[in-house]
Image (cartoon, rainbow, N blue to C red):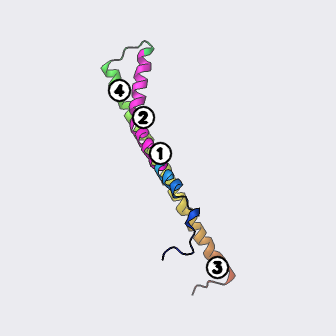
Amino acid sequence: MDGEGYDLSSFSFGAEIVTVVLVRLNSAMFYVLWTTAPILVSIISFFAFVMQGNELTVAIAFTVSGFFLWIRGVWVDVLQAIALFNMIRCVAKFLFIIFFGVVVLMTTGVLELR
């Protein structure tokens, strides 16, 4: 098993390492974005509210913060519902393929039920 007959020169291990590092970096950046987005939206919204000449009171700040948290919870629920729908759709496709395959095998006479 000294590698006779195998040509390893066609493999690009450097490119694979770079791809793995980029995937990890991409994952980390999305995590940071997902974590900091509500804070940035709140800060930008408060800044825009004050720049329009309005007075930012404690009551307004807490009401808006609660509203942003509520919207974030709804957004997470929507994303989870979409993911669940896609998963159910994939399972339904798989079951349809199995069912169709069994029907084809039965109509051709390859599969007989006793």
**Which callout, 4 or 1, points at the residue further toward the start of the chain?**
1
Q: Quadrant of the C terminus?
A: bottom right
Q: Quadrant of residue 59?
A: top left
The image's mark for residue 105 is: 3
Give the residue number, with chain letter if any, for mark 1. Answer: 26
Mark 4, residues whose alpha carbon is within 10 Å: few (<14), some, or many (≥20)?
Answer: few
Between label 4 and label 2, give the one nearer the viewer. Answer: 2
- 2 or 3: mark nearer the eye: 2
Q: Main secondary structure of the magenta part?
A: helix
The residue carrying pointer 3 sits among few (fewer than 14), some (14 to 19) or many (20 or more) residues within 10 Å by Cα, namely few
Give yes or no for contact between labels 3 and 4 (Cβ–Cβ under 8 Å): no
Q: Residues within 10 Å of mark 1 (few under 14, many from 20)?
A: few
Amino acid under label 2? Ala
Measured as percent of width and height from the top left, residue 60 is found at 35, 21
Q: CA distance from mark 2 to mark 1?
A: 16 Å
Circle 2 residue: 37
Residue topped by disc 4: 63
Which callout, 1 or 3, points at the residue further toward the start of the chain? 1
Q: CA distance from mark 3 to mark 4?
A: 63 Å
**Residues at discs 4 and 1 in contact (Cβ within 8 Å):** no
For marks 4 and 1, give the one nearer the viewer. Answer: 1
